[in-house]
Image: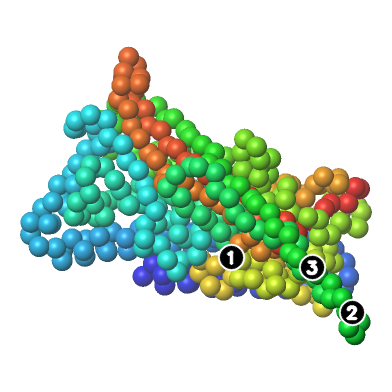
Amino acid sequence: MASELAKTLRDRRLHAWEEAKVVIQAAADEKRSLNSEEQGKYEACMVEIDDLDVRIKEILDREERSKDADRAFDRLAGMPRDERAVASQVNDQLRALVRREHGPRVETEIMPSPRAKGLGTAARLNELRTLSTTAASVGLNLVPTDFYDQLISHLIEVSGVMQAGPTVVHTDGGEPLQIPKTTSHSSAASAAQAGTIPSSDPAFGLVTLNSYKYGILLQVARELIDDGGVDLLSYLAMQAGRAIGNKFGSDLVTGAGSTQPTGFLGSASVGVTGATTGKGGAPQYADLVNLEYSVIAPYRQSRSCYWIAKDATIGGFRLIVDGNARPIWEPSAVLGSPDLLLGKPLVADPFMPAVATGSTVFSVAFGDFSQFFVRLVGGVRFERSDDFLFNQDLVAFRCLLRGDGAMVDTTGAIKKYQAPTA
């Protein structure tokens, strides 16, 4: 039922875009700007599209959580009676974790799951939810997963980079990880008959991924925990996930390295410099086409080749048309898939620079994001202490993540748009 509703909303989204496209094309055919009436109609269509995006995402997320619960109950129903009792006991113990109804401080760690395959890089992060509390036993995979799903989903949601298909490397330890790469290829040359054949060797280099720590401490009043009507898990998931996701996601875009990840934007080379003045630095149709083709074909044709920009910048893309008055932005016709720009997937990242003038402004990037490596050490740790703030009757929860990111191929896998100076 939920999928059918999501499909209905998707159809409404496509219809709203068709209405907006008619307005844009009419003005483009007459080579003029939108008048006030057309601008109002266009903006109304955009608002409707944005509202539908939110509703579709909520429906799909809710349906996925329901499927996870159904699978867990199905596995439980298929167990022998004694194993089912063990699983039920584990569930009760983990529910008691939040209320502090047992024993010493419990540490819970989310570890990578072997079930994460065939889902794409971003989706694999959703599978970091295998729990380790006491000893491994039958039924630990049946504990409620709502909290952990929300936590990891927030980490993905705030980072467009994590949706663009980077290569994610999971390691158990945090020692420096070196990734070999080529810095130049061999080149052939003509040789005269009986002459010496020239030699040319490829050059190699190394990229080192470290393990920078990200964390947040949440202080919760005991009354909130004792009040069974408070949805504490969702609250903690939202706060911890957004805080860590925002900082780590920001560093994956603009991090300077040394004490933080090296963001892809600092490693990407300039593909095109905007030549149009009087547009506030916003890229125009020709700029975007030139940026796309500044990336060589092997990278441009990769399945991990994406556009990435801030939401407000993407909003401007919806107004751009090609030489035949056709919009270059297209809404996705497949639920859960990104929209398209010039036929390539487009993701929004809140940490991309805003459109502005200046030679140091890079508001759009395009390329093969599989050449950007993201390292995650272990799992996302979520721990609790009743002793740290004992004199204030507060319970402390902390969330920790260790990771890094760096571009492996800096020769042109990802290119960026440089704004004009005026």
For residue 338, which numbered disc appears in the image?
A: 1
In this rendering, is residue 368 above or below 4? above
For the residue carrying disc 3, how many other residues have a C-alpha within 10 Å: few (<14), some (14-19), or many (20+)?
few
Mark 2 = which residue? 195
> To which residue does mark 3 refer?
200
Residue type indicated by callout 2: Gly
Left or right placement of residue 5 versus residue 34 in this view: left
Task: Answer above or below: position of 48 versus 363.
Answer: below
Q: Dividing the picture into quarters, in which one does residue 78 lie?
A: bottom left
Q: Nearer the viewer, mark 2 or mark 1?
A: 2
The residue nearer to you, when weighing 171 against 401, is 171
Q: What's the CA distance linking mark 3 and mark 2?
A: 16 Å
Label 2, label 1: how far apart the Cα atoms are: 56 Å
Q: Residue at x 30, y 48 (%)?
A: 131
Along the horizontal axis of the image, is 62 left or right of 269?
left
- Comes first in the chain, label 3 or label 2: 2
Q: Tell me which amino acid carries mark 3.
A: Ser
Q: CA distance from mark 3 to mark 1?
A: 43 Å
The residue under label 1 is which amino acid type?
A: Pro
Viewer can see residue 337: yes
Q: Position of residue 117 (x, y in %)?
A: 42, 66
Assign a secondary structure to mark 1: loop
- Who comes first in sequence, dot 2 or dot 1? 2
